[in-house]
Amino acid sequence: MSKTFQFPNGFLWGGSVSANQIEGAYQEDGKGLSIQDIMPNGIQTPPTNELTEDNMKLFAIDFYHRYKEDIKLLSEMGFKVFRTSIAWSRIFPKGDELEPNEKGLQFYDDLFDECLKYGIEPLVTISHYETPLHLVREYDGWANRKMVDFYERYVRTIFERYKNKVKYWLTFNEINSILEHPFASGGINTPKDQLSKQALYQAVHHEFVASALAVKIGHEINPDFKIGCMVIAMPIYPLTPDPNDMIKVMEADHKNTGFTDVHVRGYYPGYMKRYLKDNGITIHFEPGDEEILKNTVDFISFSYYQSSCETADPAKQIKGEGNLIGGVPNPLLTASDWGWQIDPQGLRYIMNAMYDRYQKPLFIVENGLGAVDELITDENGNKTVHDDYRINYLKEHLLQVAEAIKDGVELMGYASWGCIDLVSATTAEMKKRYGYIYVDRHDDGSGTLERYRKKSFYWYKDVIESNGSSL
Ligand code: BG6
């Protein structure tokens, strides 16, 4: 890239995490259990329905007690933004109480103060795969309309409490993953194979209403709030030029754009109505829902890890490994150790596609490489990781981001995933690391929890300092 290219002024460079993947302290200061506490093997495996000590997330990286040290390290890299989630069950331990848990609220007050002390903007996900367990067991999660009321009480509480500390909010993490993962994403207890499409899409509707309600309430509480939706962005290519493959691509795309269309335009698009009709699904709208949906988001945020393919040929319809949604593997791409296909240009493509469709600001709130790292002692006696593979991955993606910006895409920021090593979501492993900061904890529970700067730490610091021109 030309050395003179700079990212836009005020560009929000930083990183992302979620509460359940870093905090630990799963029962401290009144916190209730969340679905993550009974998912010791990650999102792609059914829950155990009980607490098991081998669940890495119960302790995670003990961020709950070490956040000061960690935020300081992030500030050393020059972070402008830090994305984390609020653990709903710290604020409302069961989810259906009338009064919040003060100690839970205080923790996030302290955390946001710590960020602001270093000039780091908190970017807060309201619900990141961590629905309070009680809401799942008692109400069947988002399949139940009552969730809208519980969520409303929760968002009012946190918006009021943090209205002068947090400006950027995301309503649901990767909301489009609910179709594939109704338990993890929608807190729906009914097993997927017993869940009707009618119930699933009704749950989607409840989330749409809750999300739009959050936008409405947020803007009333503080008109300066910027509230976004958050989706898995996945470009889908036809496996061959067969027009039948292209129609499959269109249908697969619709499964994702349906979520952004409702958030950005405020109503169900025609192709979604057709899908619902063809599948005998009738969404029940409560009086007022149509009006609520008109509270559209200020920006669109997304995770980007990979692209995938679609084919109309049943013999080739093999599901690849990878992130929470996905299709047929692309024969032209390589993959990470976990089978996630690597496609930096796909990022430029999807940014253009989204911006062309909506002309709304975008925010990349997840991107990165999960890899096995080896902690070594360098020539100066410092422990570190020579993670050139990670630097290379991030650099290739950021160069494509720069191209998309040159294409005219309006991008608010880039917050790479897992800026400090954390427990993976899909597999609940520590050994799948994304961070610029190494955390000495291992899947057998051993480790000192010491933090070490990786080579990528210094690389990212330079990128931020130069506002991207060092790439
Ligand atoms: C996204 C999630 O799907 O992917 C994160 O929002 C998750 O919570 C990330 O950690 C990477 O997935 P994994 O399984 O490698 O942790």
Image (cartoon, rainbow, N blue to C red):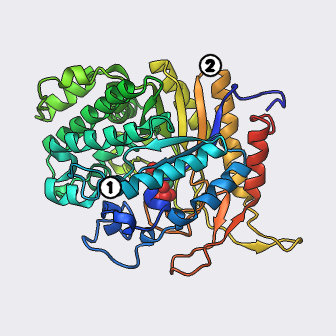
Q: Nearer the viewer, residue 231 or 104?
A: 104
Q: Nearer the viewer, residue 220 or 250?
A: 220
Answer above or below: position of 30 versus 276: below
Answer above or below: position of 131 versus 292: below
Identify the residue at image location x=50%, y=38%: 166
Residue 436: image quadrant is bottom right
Q: Residue furthest right?
A: 379
Whether residue 321 is visible, yes or no, is no
Q: Amino acid at mark 1?
A: Asn
Mark 2 Cα shell of 10 Å, populated few (<14), some (14-19), many (≥20)? some
- State yes or no: Cβ of the residue under disc 2 lies below 8 Å from any atom of ligand 1: no
Identify the residue at image location x=28%, y=71%: 48
Identify the residue at image location x=16%, y=23%: 288
Answer above or below: position of 426 versus 207: below
From the top left corner, tell me how far across and down residue 153 is, in percent: 26, 41
Whether residue 303 is visible, yes or no, is yes
Residue 357: image quadrant is top left
Q: Which mark is residue 436?
A: none
Q: Nearer the viewer, residue 437 or 331?
A: 437
Which of the image's four quarters has the N terminus?
top right
In this rendering, position of residue 37 left or right of residue 303:
left
Secondary structure under badge 2? loop
From the top left corner, tell me how far across and down residue 55 is, in percent: 40, 73
| C-beta proximity under 8 Å, tags 2 and 1 | no
Q: Amino acid at mark 2?
A: Gly
In this rendering, position of residue 340 left or right of residue 36:
right
From the top left corner, tell me how far across and down residue 414 is, in percent: 61, 38
Q: Which residue is mark 2?
A: 408
Identify the residue at image location x=37%, y=30%: 218
Q: Which residue is mark 1?
A: 101
